[in-house]
Amino acid sequence: MSLKAFHLVFVTLCTLLAVGFGAWALTEPSGAHRWLGVLSLVAAAGLPVYGWWFLRKTKGVDLW
C-alpha cells in the first residue's frame, strides 16, 4: 500500500470517527460535550474537503 493510499484510508477513518464521536457527544447532557460534538462535526465536514484537495495535489502519484 502506498503512502497516498494509506493517507486516503486514514482520512476516511478519521472522518467516520469524527462523525461517530460528534453524534455521541451531542447526545450527552453536559455543555462541554456538546461543544466537543460540534467541533467534531465541523472537523468531519472539513476532512473530506482536505481529502479532495490531497487527491488533486497528488494527481501524478500512483495510488498503488
Image (cartoon, rainbow, N blue to C red):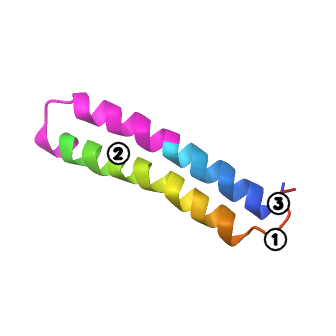
The local secondary structure at tag 2 comes to helix
> Label 2, on which residue?
41
Task: Tell me what residue is drawn at x 42 percent, y 38 percent.
Answer: 19
Q: Nearer the viewer, residue 2 or 49?
A: 49
Residue 6: quadrant of the picture: bottom right
Residue 62 shown left or right of residue 42 in the figure: right
Question: Residue 4's x, y, as percent?
Answer: 75, 62
Q: Type of residue at label 3?
A: Ser
Q: What separation in Å lies between label 3 and label 1 (alpha carbons)?
A: 13 Å
> Is disc 3 in contact with disc 1, using a CB cutoff of under 8 Å?
no
Which residues make up the magenta segment? 16-33
In the displayed structure, 3 sits above or below 43; it is below
Question: Residue 18's x, y, as percent?
Answer: 43, 44
In the displayed structure, 61 sits above or below 12; it is below
For marks 3 and 1 on the same chain, the one whose residue lies earlier in the sequence = 3
> Label 3, on which residue?
2
Would you call the spot at circle 1 few (<14 residues within 10 Å), some (14-19), or many (20 or more)? few
Task: Tell me what residue is drawn at x 82 percent, y 58 percent.
Answer: 63
Mark identifier at residue 60 = 1
